[in-house]
Image (tube, rainbow, N blue to C red):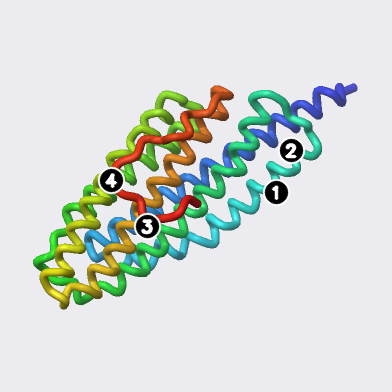
Amino acid sequence: MSDPTQHTVKSYEQELELLKSIMARMGGLVERQTALAIKAIVERNEEAAIEAPELDPEVDELEREAEMLAIRILALRSPMAVDLREIVAALKITGDLERIGDYASSISRRSLKLDSLDGNMSMTGLKNMGRLVQDNLRRVIDALTQRNRDLAIEVWQADTAVDELYTAMFRELMTYMMEDPRYITSCIHLLFVAKHIERIGDHTTNIAERVYYAVTGQMLPSERPRGGLKTHPSE
């Protein structure tokens, strides 16, 4: 005769593994959305611009699945210690991932409005910023799946460089607009794009903080590394 207690524990462990699997799938999708968005804006790739928003429904559905599963585990399993931290972190991490996907989709849609972008405008700053944010996102997803606190700290510390690149982009685009009014429309779109990339970086840093907490039970300093200027309210 099977032990009902053993069956319950096994089921509980399966639920935890399923939650981790959902987050990993969601992270992979959002990472792809972000890569497509950067490709769309930097390379003016229309196919990438169309594909990124098409992934939104799947990301949203995974967020709902993760939320329902996490609430079920909290209600029925009464998790403690590490398990409780990971479940609470999962609820917040999936929210951050969903927001990253939304920003990536917005970048992709704006890229389709830049047909008139002047060839003299450099995209180097945007390309560098996008590359850094992509790298940080990839590493934080690795930190999440590997429960790697050291990697989470590295990503958390890298936010300063993202902020500094955003500040440089902001000033460069303002200069373009002041020098020639014909650039204003394109520059406004690019300012929104730069801000969205910077926000992806902020949500990536949020995930790093939550991974660190889930693994260690400790909070990173409330004052995260900052660089450059911040023009948005906290979210």
Disc 1 marks which residue?
Answer: 68
Q: Secondary structure at mark 4?
A: loop
Asked whether the beta carbons under mark 3 and mark 2 sit within 8 Å of each other, the answer is no
In this view, 203 is above or below 60: above
Looking at the rendered structure, the kind of residue marked 2 is: Ile
The disc, 3 or 1, on the residue closer to the chain's N-terminal end is: 1
3 or 2: tag closer to the N-terminus: 2
Give the secondary structure at mark 3.
helix
Q: Secondary structure at mark 2?
A: helix
> Which residue is disc 3 drawn over?
196
- Name the residue at 34% across, 53% down: 197
Mark 2 to mark 1: distance in Å?
9 Å
Depth-wise, is mark 3 or mark 2 nearer the camera?
A: 3
**Which x, y percent locates residue 215?**
55, 25
Among numbered discs 2 and 1, the one appearing first in the sequence:
1
* Badge 2 vs badge 1, beta-carbon distance below 8 Å: no
Q: Amino acid at mark 1?
A: Met
The residue at which mark 4 appears reads as 228
Q: Nearer the viewer, mark 1 or mark 4?
A: 4
Which of discs 3 and 1 lies nearer the camera? The answer is 3
Element at badge 1?
A: helix
Amino acid type at mark 3 = His
How many residues crowd mark 4 within 10 Å: few (<14), some (14–19), many (20+)? few
Residue drawn at point x = 45 percent, y = 31 percent: 143
* Picture quadrant of residue 43: bottom left
- Amino acid type at circle 4 is Gly
- Provide the residue designation for mark 2: 73
Which of the two discs, 3 and 4, sits closer to the camera?
4
- Picture layout, residue 1 above or below residue 138: above
